Amino acid sequence: MRNFAFIVSVGLLSTSLSAQNAQPAPPSAPSSASPAKSIGLYAYPKNNQTADQQLKDENECYGSAKTDSGVDPNAPPPAPPSAEQQQAAQQQAAQQAGQSVPKGGGVKGAAGGAAGGAAIGAIAGDAGKGAAIGATAGAVAGRRAQKKAQKAAEKQAAQQTAQTQQQTQNQANAQHQQQLDSFKRAFSACMDARGYSIK
């Protein structure tokens, strides 16, 4: 029982000491960050406005420009597709292009090889054997040519898809920049009307 009373008294003592040492959190100060600087502009008072008045004017013009332009300059730019998404789109385009390559390269090659082999075999004295050898060689060459054409089509489709993705991202970035420029023009006009030089 004594141990229990001792543990309780030590616990109470440590709790009261920590409560005495705890400092109250300082009240949060109003934001003194310059909205002009947050968007890459500098405001200089033309009529000797105080720093407090300038901050008030900047905040009001920031809100006005946001409303007038419909643009939130704190909104992130459009995110590009992830590497996985880009790769998946390129692979899909490559597969579709590979499927569009004409089939039957081996058969066409065999027919051409057989004809050539028969002609050579006829000269050598055995047209049948020459045709068989020519057909085999032609089939192999035909399949090889078909696979080469398929790989080339897949590579070209993947490259075209990558270029299209890059162009789309560039257009989205340009549009985002135009929106930011519109916001900055609205902000600058407001600040200019209130007697500030904006650069």
Image (cartoon, rainbow, N blue to C red):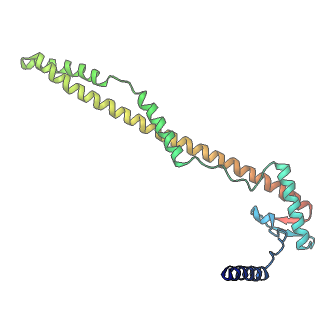
Question: Where in the figure is residue 30, as x and y percent of width and height?
Answer: 85, 69
Q: Is residue 86 left or right of residue 134?
A: right
Q: Residue furthest front?
A: 1
Q: Is residue 199 visible?
A: no
Quadrant into which the N terminus falls = bottom right
51 up-or-down from 3: above or below: above
Q: How many marks?
A: 0
Question: Where in the figure is residue 41, as x and y percent of width and height?
Answer: 77, 64
Quadrant into which the C terminus falls = bottom right
Question: Where in the figure is residue 7, as x and y percent of width and height?
Answer: 68, 80
Residue at x-position 81% and y-position 55%: 185
Q: Is residue 179 left or right of residue 50?
A: left
Q: Is residue 78 visible?
A: yes
Q: Residue furthest left?
A: 125
Residue at x-position 24% and y-position 25%: 139
Near-viewer residue (20 or 133): 20
Q: Is residue 100 left or right of residue 53?
A: left
The picture quadrant where one finds residue 190 is bottom right
The picture quadrant where one finds residue 155 is top left
Question: Where in the figure is residue 31, as x and y percent of width and height?
Answer: 82, 68
44 up-or-down from 62: above or below: below
Residue at x-position 70% and y-position 47%: 175
Near-viewer residue (184 or 77): 77
